[in-house]
Structures are given as structure tokens and as C-alpha cells.
């Protein structure tokens, strides 16, 4: 089995065990996404309560992701990732048993132990299990596995919903992290978490705050923070308001809008493997620079699109650029930080994304009170302009041949 999995893409069985486990960890969220608001309304929540419940997780992420990473470095990554699987599975069991919306206010404070630690640990473990010269390819493949749930999760929900109802979806979703844990524990893959060379062990290395200081001293990490906050802010505004704009101003049906979002998810996912290879050959900085030029233009095209075919093409470009951006950002990060601060650097940049998403959600509602939708969509293009000089100021690094 180990040799078969390795033959799929040239990486070790450990890499694919972590990648598939990550897919299984994320899948419950994608299964719940289409029905969560409906389920909360079914349990008696009001729409303002639904909005508050959905915002709790992001707010907790901002404050707790980095502290949880610091705790992980003392407890051990392997132990923490096992705990994350257990917490994720049990959280969905609690959602299944919830008799009222009040439970949904409380469970995120428990579930944050999983969602606040897993992503950076799994991504770090996957890159550690791949050769340094193929980090872009590895990140592209890993993120393709992780985001495949964007299609598979809603599909599973649509099939099962008629048979088991809203609550039953949460029970079914709890099975997948349990399967992921079994796989991670070594079901033929040898998925033990592997540390990068020179990664500090135990209490002998720098403390958590010292490591965070090391992260913030890296210029390219600060520049990537600007890039991620800017894009996350614009993306959150776009995904919040685009459906309303498309239905009210463009007179598109909700089913067509849903189809456009599926196009975004499809392009976002399938582009990640080839762009990882491209980032290894060209250097992630070059790919990222060109991508953000296209993103800025793409937002403008979407704002002025009145033809469904032009809009569909622009939406396809938006999804593809989102996938290219993500892979290129992580590839550049692992190229410029020392192995001992890689996981904490990832936590910091995940936090930057959460900050942008929270600000974008708040801004989207406020902007509609004094700006038309088209002007707001044009504003999303302007928000990304600072990313261009930020990316240009980054180091030129090419993993295949060293620093240029």
C-alpha cells in the first residue's frame, strides 16, 4: 500500500496519509455548510442569532490560533493532531444531539481546540514529508486534497438529506474525522508526524514568544501578512455581497448564482497541483505577482459584467486565481522561514486571513448603506492594489536552484 500511494505523485506514503487525513478532517465542515443556517432556524434561532453563531469561530481563531500553536510545541505535534481529530468528531456528535440553538453558541469554544490547531499542523507535517526542492508541488497536491471537500461534502449532504434530515447530516459528518484519525495513526501509511530538520524539540529551544518574535522579524512574513489580509478582506466582501448583487442587479436566479459559486470551487481546487509545480520552476514570488495583477483586473471585469458568459469567465478566473494565490503564498513562506518557526509562521498567516475575513464581513454590511453594489465590487479591486508593491519587495527564491 505504501509503494502504491507513493506512486500516485512521487511523495511518501506519510505525505498522502496526512493529505487524505486532512481531507477527512475538513469534510464535515463542507457537509454542514449548506444546511447549518437552515438547521439553526429549524431549532428556533433567529437570523441575528444565526449570524452571531457563524461569526464565533472566526473570532476565536483570531485570538487563540497562535496560543494553541505555542501550546502544541510543548505538548507535541503528533499528540495535538490526534486530539484535534477526537475533538472534531465529538463536536459534530454534540451538534447532532443539540436540542436548541444555545448549544451552538457553546460548542465552538470546545471545537476551537481542533479547528485552531489542525490546519497549520497538517500543512507543516505535509511539507516536512516532501523534499525541499518540491515544496510547491507538495503544497499544491496537499491543498487539492484538503479542498476536494468543497465538491464532495455538499454532494454527500444532498444525497443523504432526504433520508436522515438535518441532524442526521451532523451524525454522518462525525464519522469522517474518526476515519481520518484511524488513517493518521498508521493504517498502512506510516503517518507519524515528522519534524523538519532543526525544528526545536522539548523545552531546550526558544520559547513561544521568542519564536513569535523570530517570525515577525522575517520581512517576507510581514509582507505576506499584508497580502493575505488584503485578499481575505476583499474576498469576504465579494462572497458576502456577490449573490445579492447578482440576483437584484443582474436578475440572475439563485440557482445560477449557486452554479457560479460551484465554478469558483472547481477552478480553485483543480488549479492547485499544476500551479505548485509551476511555483517550483518559476519561483512562487513571480507566480504570486502575476496572479494579483489578474485578480485586480478580474474584480473590475466582474463589476462591469452584464453578460452571463463574460461573468462566468471572470468567475472562473476568480476561482483559479484564488487557488494559485494560496499555493504560491504557502510555497514562498516555506522557502523563506527557518524550519523551527515554520508552523508558527503558518499560524500567524492563518490568523491574518481570519482578521481580513472578519473585517470583510463587517465592512460588507456597512458599505451597502452608502455605496451601490457595483462601486463596492470596484473597491475590492482597489483593496488589492497594495499587494503588488508588497509582493515586489519580497525575496526572489527558487526552491529548485536556490536563491536567485
Image: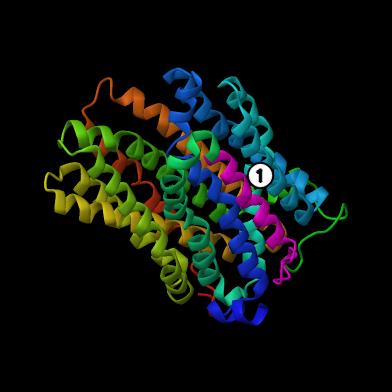
Task: List x then y, in percent, for residue 117.
Answer: 67, 46
Q: Quadrant of the N terminus?
A: bottom right
Location of residue 250 by image quarter? top left
User: 276 or 48: nearer the eye?
Assistant: 48
Task: List x then y, in percent, for residue 45.
Answer: 48, 19
Residues shaded magenta: 169-195
User: 299 or 100: nearer the eye?
Assistant: 100
- Read off the residue under disc 1: 89
Instruction: Please state if 3 lies on the left or on the right of 27 as rendered.
Output: right
Residue 281 to residue 157: above or below? below
Task: List x then y, in percent, for residue 148.
Answer: 47, 58
Instruction: Please state if 310 lies on the left or on the right of 221 as rendered.
Output: left
In the image, farthest residue toward the left = 307
Task: List x then y, in percent, for residue 224.
Answer: 50, 52
Taking the image as drawn, is residue 266 in sight? yes
Residue 53 to residue 404: above or below? above
Residue at x 39% of width, y 64% of height: 270
Q: Is residue 152 magenta?
A: no
Residue 7 to residue 310: above or below? below
Amino acid at each position: 500500500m505504501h509503494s502504491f500511494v507513493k506512486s500516485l505523485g512521487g511523495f511518501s506514503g506519510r505525505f498522502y496519509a496526512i493529505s487524505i487525513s486532512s481531507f477527512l478532517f475538513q469534510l464535515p465542515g463542507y457537509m454542514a455548510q449548506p444546511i447549518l443556517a437552515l438547521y439553526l432556524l429549524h431549532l428556533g434561532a433567529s437570523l441575528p442569532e444565526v449570524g452571531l453563531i457563524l461569526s464565533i469561530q472566526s473570532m476565536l481563531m483570531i485570538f487563540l490560533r497562535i496560543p494553541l500553536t505555542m501550546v502544541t510545541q510543548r505538548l507535541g505535534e503528533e499528540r495535538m493532531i490526534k486530539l484535534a481529530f477526537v475533538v472534531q468528531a465529538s463536536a459534530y456528535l454534540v451538534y447532532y444531539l443539540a436540542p436548541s440553538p444555545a448549544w451552538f453558541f457553546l460548542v465552538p469554544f470546545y471545537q476551537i481546540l481542533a479547528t485552531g490547531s489542525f490546519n497549520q499542523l497538517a500543512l507543516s507535517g505535509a511539507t516536512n514529508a516532501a523534499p525541499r526542492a518540491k515544496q510547491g508541488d507538495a503544497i499544491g497536491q496537499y491543498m487539492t486534497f484538503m479542498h476536494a471537500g468543497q465538491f464532495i461534502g455538499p454532494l454527500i449532504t444532498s444525497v443523504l438529506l432526504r433520508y436522515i434530515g438535518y441532524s442526521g447530516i451532523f451524525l454522518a459528518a462525525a464519522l469522517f474525522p474518526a476515519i481520518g484519525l484511524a488513517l493518521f495513526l498508521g493504517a498502512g501509511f506510516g503517518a507519524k508526524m515528522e519534524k523538519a530538520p532543526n525544528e526545536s524539540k522539548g523545552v531546550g529551544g526558544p520559547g513561544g514568544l521568542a519564536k513569535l518574535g523570530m517570525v515577525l522579524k522575517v520581512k517576507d512574513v510581514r509582507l505576506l501578512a499584508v497580502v493575505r489580509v488584503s485578499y481575505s478582506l476583499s474576498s469576504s466582501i465579494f462572497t458576502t455581497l456577490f449573490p445579492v448583487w447578482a440576483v437584484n442587479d443582474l436578475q440572475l436566479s439563485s440557482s445560477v448564482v449557486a452554479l457560479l459559486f460551484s465554478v469558483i470551487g472547481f477552478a480553485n481546487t483543480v488549479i492547485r497541483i499544476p500551479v505548485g509545480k509551476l511555483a517550483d520552476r518559476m519561483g512562487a514570488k513571480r507566480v504570486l505577482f502575476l496572479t494579483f495583477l489578474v485578480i485586480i483586473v478580474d474584480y473590475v471585469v466582474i463589476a462591469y459584467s452584464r453578460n452571463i458568459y463574460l461573468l462566468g469567465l471572470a468567475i472562473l478566473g476568480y476561482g483559479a486565481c484564488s487557488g494559485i494565490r494560496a499555493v504560491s503564498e504557502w510555497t514562498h513562506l516555506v522557502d523563506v522561514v527557518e524550519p523551527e518557526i515554520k508552523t508558527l509562521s503558518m499560524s500567524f498567516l492563518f490568523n491574518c486571513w481570519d482578521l481580513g475575513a472578519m473585517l470583510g464581513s463587517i465592512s460588507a454590511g456597512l458599505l451597502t448603506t452608502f455605496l451601490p453594489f457595483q462601486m463596492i465590487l470596484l473597491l475590492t479591486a482597489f483593496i488589492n492594489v497594495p499587494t503588488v508593491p508588497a509582493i515586489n519587495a519580497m525575496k526572489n527564491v527558487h526552491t529548485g536552484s536556490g536563491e536567485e
